[in-house]
Amino acid sequence: MIKLNDKNLNEEFRRLYHGRGADGEYKSVTIDSINDILFVQFFEDEKEEIIEFLKEYMKTSRHDILLSKHRPSNTLKTIVGEVPKDAVAIENGLKFKLNFYNQNIGYFGDTKNARMYVEYKAKDKKVLNLFSYTCGFSLYAKRGGASKIINMDMSKNAIATGMKNHSINGFDMKNILFWPHNILKSFSKIKKNASYDIIIIDPPTYQTNFIAKNDYLKIIKRLDSFSNENTTFIACLNSPEYDDEFLKNLVENNSSFKFKKRIANPDGYKNGSLKALVFSFY
C-alpha cells in the first residue's frame, strides 16, 4: 500500500500522497490532510482499497472526517463524518475558505512556496495578481506589507471567496482591489493603473476563456507596459504538457524580462507539474 507523508502532522494543510505524475497503480490518487479532515481525490477510477486503507489509518491519526471525490464526475462522497460547513485550509497560519463541492475546492497547496516568495518581496510594493482565483497570493502580499494589491479573475465567485479570505484572516482591505474581469479584455484598465512592482500570473491551463498554449502569450506581450525597471515577474503554469523551457522562452522572447530562478515545489509535490519561475526586468 502507499506511504503517507504524515510525519509531525498538525492543523496545517499537508499533501500526504501525490500520485499524479508518478508511476504505478495509484498514479491518479491524491490524499490531503486538512486539519481533522482526510480528503482523497481519484482522477481516474476510484480505488476501494485506498478508502479501506484510510479508514484503518484514521484509527490512530488526528482525523475524524474522510471525504472522497471522483474528479472526472466531480462527485463528492462522505465516507466518515460530515462535510464541514466552514472548513478552511491553514497554510503558514493563513486561512483559505474551502468548498468541497466545487471541482477546485478553493486552495492549491502546490503554490505554497511561490506565495511565500511574494510575502518576502512584498514590503511597500504594488502588486498585480492576475488569475487571482481565491486570492492566496494577495493574502501573502498583504501580510508582507504590500502598499497596494490588485486581484483580477473573471470568476465572480472566486473573487468573492478571495474577499472572504482576507476578512477571516483579519486583514484591513484598504488598498486591496478585487476586479472580476476577463483579463484578456482588460488590458487598458490594467495599464491605466500601472506600473507594478510585482506581477503574478497563475492561470489555468485550459478553460473556455483561456487556453495557455495560445493566450498566455497575449499577456506576456503586454508585460513591459505594466512594469518598471525594478519589477519582479512570477510566472506560473501547472501542466505536464509544458516544461520550464517553454515558459522561460515564452517570457524571454516576448518581453524585456530575463529568467532569475525557479521556485521549488513544496514537500509532498515532488511529482507535481507546477512551474513557478521568477523573472527580473532588464
Image: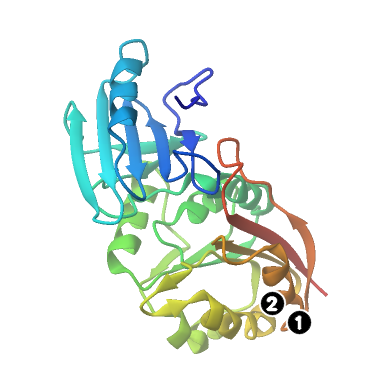
Residue placed at 47% from the left, 43% from the top?
A: 27
Which residue, given by chain and number where applicable, does mark 1 sit on? 253
Mark 1–mark 2 distance (CA, rounded to whole Å): 6 Å
Say whether residue 42 is left or right of residue 145.
left
Residue 62 — which label?
A: none
| 114 vs 175: above or below | above
Q: Secondary structure at mark 2?
A: helix
Q: Secondary structure at mark 1?
A: loop
Residue placed at 73% from the left, 81% from the top?
A: 255
Q: Amino acid at mark 2?
A: Leu
Residue 219: horizontal and vertical position, in percent?
58, 81
Which residue, given by chain and number where applicable, does mark 2 sit on? 250
Q: Amino acid at mark 1?
A: Asn
| 3 vs 113: above or below | above
Q: Quadrant of the N terminus?
A: top left
- Mark 1 and mark 2 residues within 8 Å of each other at the beta carbon: yes
Residue 55: horizontal and vertical position, in percent?
28, 21
Say whether residue 102 is left or right of residue 233.
left
